[in-house]
């Protein structure tokens, strides 16, 4: 992954994107004092050498002419729990400044007092900022555009006449951050910035974490004086200061949540909001079992952030830059080893069998499957299983649960106990949330709402800062021009109705009709598509458990003519022996035509194959689905519709290439442009109901005695329900004498009996 240049970083030193949003939650019960919390944490986590110090800043409550945000305080909470439970920071060494605390003076003073004055050589320092950023005129002209990026504190109001009149602002410049980093006595410095300076306002359901600046704004005299004071303290001349910051960052590692020209946005997740990058970044570090160089970790985080943002119609590629000494070249994240066990959650409080949890390792896409009595496995430090914890309730990423003990399980749990997913619970009535575009007039919007309400499991919503899967709207002239300007091809007619992604900056392929269509006719026409999109959401988001499945299976997509790898996936937890830490993970290889985001680009007509290897000592029943950018699904394995159940079986320790030369057909990339996903589902038991339904679909297509993939259209939601019912029946059956009780209104998915993995690829002309 290419590094950003020094000048790129510090002209944009607020370049971090938060494309997830989470509204506020309490991390702990108010009755449990901070002092007691710290005491408990201190008993669990021994303070190690070197000392680890963190300053975390998050601002939602901007006022005046600066738009408030939603997810920045939650970013701080996510980072705090991560540093405490994964990296062993003492909570007393983590200073947080949120909302009204985060004034310019308080941020600068905290950096000086908490970080600069306390950190000694070899210590670890972390600075995180989530909030608005902008650009001001740069007196030194480091960059061609003549601007320097800034972090906007809570009191960083814009000039009264803005945006028509400019003037000086009380912001913290990238130049200032460089000086503060230079003053630290340690080289083990990490700066994380989840803000941006490009654009502003809103994009669909997202609020951008930046304010337009540029020519109108100048740095305050106080800011320039502060920089001069630090130059004197550091014994650095003004020219030396300019030269140093044009060469590299001051020291350590700097992580930006988005590229310079991209947006950082608040991202809604059900009942909370957060920055997309901060969520993906912290969740990745909860899931990662071992230590790895920051460069490799950031490549993986970049791919995940890009995929998450792309699904919402936002482009976001996190970047990082480093100034590491040779001995630190392979430094891990935060220059600190972390716990070796991957986790979905950690216990933060214990009262008898009642526990409070932090759920920082959950995949954002499947949060709804962790609401109605799912189960986690409690692990001892060596990875041994101590029993099950049932999640009784969840608000944001804070949960309350019950430790399920029996006569064979002794002892109590302690704060800091790691939890891994065992059973998720998918609601039977999971809905597709469709926003009604605010640009529609009242009469048209009301007609759209009424028509959508008549469709089962479709939930029409007002477009606000809450989670939506799609937005129903009309293509108007202004939006057409904007989409055309952004390079969107095959645009529908102005006046036509269809579906947009939540940012309103991308359309859903094949969902727009003719310009003379009424809104009621448009909704009627979209009914099959909405069913497909709901089914795709269930399969892709609710079943996906690549990180948490305990089944050991590997899958890859390859170029057919040379069997060259395009992309691969494997169950990380299934490939690791918990007690020994040994792993059977595939050796990393170079991928074919990987885009800058890490997602491979494949041209229409490319011939591909899949290879699936069962690494278990038991047989597995495998199904492969492909869902294209329009939400249409095809079943490409099994394809022998005359002997369907046996055709899905892959024997122990055996690979299977799909299709093989003698199977009589080829797999080629179809013509729907955009991001598609191949979903590989492996179960320890045959999915009989779903397979019987598939066989009937094949018969209606005239494929009963052929060997061929089968497209699934009108039957897609019924097929998905059959699949869930099969998996639920397997989950509820007795397992080694132990039955897991689940509510009647959910379908349970057991990590010991199911692996559901995805390979994403972008189809291009």
Image: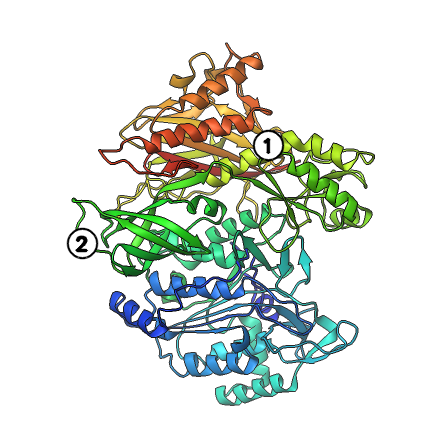
User: Marks 2/1: CA distance?
Assistant: 48 Å
Front-most of 544 and 484? 544
Using the rendered image of the protein, determine whether residue 609 is visible from the camera's viewpoint.
Answer: no
The residue wearing badge 1 is: 531
Q: Position of residue 341 (x, y in %)?
A: 30, 52
**Vertical relation: 306 (above or below) 414:** above
Decide if residue 134 is in sight here. Answer: yes
Q: Are marks 2 and 1 in contact (CB under 8 Å)?
A: no
Q: From the viewer's perspective, is residue 721 above or below residue 593?
A: above
* 522 or 126: nearer the viewer: 522
Residue 456: which numbered mark, if any? Answer: none
Mark 2 — residue? 411
Q: How many marks?
A: 2
Name the spot of residue 269 as percent of width and height, x first: 53, 52
On screen, residue 456 versus residue 321, left or right, reads right
Colour scheme of the picture? rainbow
Q: Quadrant of residue 451?
A: top right
Task: Specify the quadrant that holds the C terminus.
Answer: top right
Residue 43: image quadrant is: bottom left
Q: Is residue 171 above or below residue 319?
A: below
Tag 1 secondary structure? helix
Q: Is residue 586 above or below residue 123?
A: above
- Helix, strand or loop for disc 2: loop
Residue ID at (35%, 30%) = 730
Percent x, y for residue 383?
25, 49
Other-residue count near label 2 (Cα within 10 Å), few / some / many at <14 / 14–19 / ≥20: few
The residue drawn where x is 58% and y is 45% is: 311
């Amino acid at each position: 992954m290419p590094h950003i240049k020094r000048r790129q970083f510090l002209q944009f030193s607020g370049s971090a994107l938060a494309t997830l949003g989470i509204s506020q939650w309490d991390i702990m019960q108010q009755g449990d004092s901070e002092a007691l919390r710290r005491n408990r944490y201190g008993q669990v986590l021994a303070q190690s050498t070197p000392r680890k110090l963190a300053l975390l800043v998050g601002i939602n409550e901007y006022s005046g002419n600066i738009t408030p945000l939603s997810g920045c305080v939650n970013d701080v909470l996510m980072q705090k729990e991560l540093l405490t439970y994964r990296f062993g920071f003492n909570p007393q060494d983590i200073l947080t400044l949120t909302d009204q605390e985060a004034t310019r003076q308080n941020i600068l003073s905290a950096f000086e007092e908490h970080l600069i004055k306390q950190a000694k050589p070899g210590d670890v320092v972390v600075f995180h900022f989530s909030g608005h950023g902008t650009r001001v005129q740069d007196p030194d002209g480091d960059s061609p555009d003549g601007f320097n990026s800034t972090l906007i504190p809570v009191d960083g109001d814009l000039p009264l006449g803005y945006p028509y009149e400019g003037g000086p602002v009380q912001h913290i410049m990238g130049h200032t951050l460089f000086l503060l980093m230079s003053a630290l006595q340690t080289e083990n410095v990490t700066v994380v910035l989840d803000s941006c300076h490009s654009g502003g306002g809103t994009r669909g359901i997202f609020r951008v974490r930046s304010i337009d600046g540029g020519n109108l704004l100048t740095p305050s005299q106080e800011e320039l004086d502060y920089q001069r004071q630090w130059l004197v303290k550091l014994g650095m001349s003004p020219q030396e200061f300019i030269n140093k910051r044009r060469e590299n960052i001051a020291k350590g590692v700097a992580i930006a949540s988005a590229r310079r020209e991209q947006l950082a946005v608040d991202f809604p997740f059900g009942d909370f909001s957060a920055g997309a990058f901060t969520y993906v970044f912290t969740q990745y570090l909860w899931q990662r079992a071992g230590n790895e160089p920051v460069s490799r970790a950031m490549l993986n985080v970049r791919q995940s952030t890009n995929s998450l943002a792309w699904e919402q119609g936002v482009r976001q590629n996190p970047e990082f830059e480093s100034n590491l000494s040779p001995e630190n070249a392979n430094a891990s994240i935060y220059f600190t080893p972390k716990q070796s066990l991957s986790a979905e959650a950690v216990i933060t409080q214990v009262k008898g069998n009642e526990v409070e949890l932090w759920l920082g390792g959950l995949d954002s896409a499947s949060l709804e499957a962790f609401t109605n009595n799912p189960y986690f496995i409690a692990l001892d430090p060596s990875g041994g299983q101590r029993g099950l914890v049932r999640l009784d309730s969840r608000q944001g990423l804070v949960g309350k649960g019950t430790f399920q003990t029996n006569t064979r399980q002794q002892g109590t749990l302690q704060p800091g106990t790691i939890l891994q997913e065992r059973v998720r619970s998918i609601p039977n009535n999971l809905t597709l949330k469709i926003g009604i575009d605010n640009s529609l007039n009242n009469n048209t919007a009301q007609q759209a709402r009424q028509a959508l309400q008549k469709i089962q499991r479709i939930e029409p919503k007002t477009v606000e800062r809450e989670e939506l899967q799609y937005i129903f709207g009309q293509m108007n002239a202004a939006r057409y021009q904007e989409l055309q300007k952004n390079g969107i091809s095959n645009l529908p007619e102005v006046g036509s109705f269809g579906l947009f992604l939540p940012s309103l900056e991308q359309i859903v392929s094949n969902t727009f009709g003719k310009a003379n269509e009424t809104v009621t006719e448009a909704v009627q026409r979209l009914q099959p598509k909405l069913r497909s999109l709901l089914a795709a959401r269930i399969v892709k988001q609710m079943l996906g458990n690549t990180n948490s499945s305990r089944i050991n299976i590997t899958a890859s997509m390859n170029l057919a003519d040379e069997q060259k790898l395009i992309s691969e996936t494997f169950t990380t937890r299934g490939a690791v022996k918990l007690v020994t830490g040994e792993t059977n993970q595939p050796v990393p290889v170079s991928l074919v035509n990987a885009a800058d985001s890490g997602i491979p680009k494949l041209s229409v007509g490319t011939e591909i194959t899949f290879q699936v290897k069962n690494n278990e000592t038991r047989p597995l029943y495998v199904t492969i689905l492909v869902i294209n950018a329009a939400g249409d699904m095809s079943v490409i394995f099994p394809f022998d519709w005359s002997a369907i159940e046996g055709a899905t079986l892959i024997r122990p320790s055996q690979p299977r290439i799909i299709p093989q030369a003698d199977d009589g057909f080829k797999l080629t990339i179809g013509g729907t442009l955009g991001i598609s996903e191949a979903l590989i589902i492996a179960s320890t038991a045959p999915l009989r109901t779903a397979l019987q339904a598939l066989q009937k679909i094949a018969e209606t297509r005239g494929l009963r005695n052929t060997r061929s993939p089968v497209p699934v259209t009108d039957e897609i939601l019924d097929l998905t329900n059959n699949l869930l019912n099969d998996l639920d029946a397997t989950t509820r059956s007795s397992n080694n004498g132990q039955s897991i009780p689940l509510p009647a209104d959910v379908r349970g998915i057991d990590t010991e009996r199911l692996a559901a993995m995805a390979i994403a690829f972008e189809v291009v002309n």
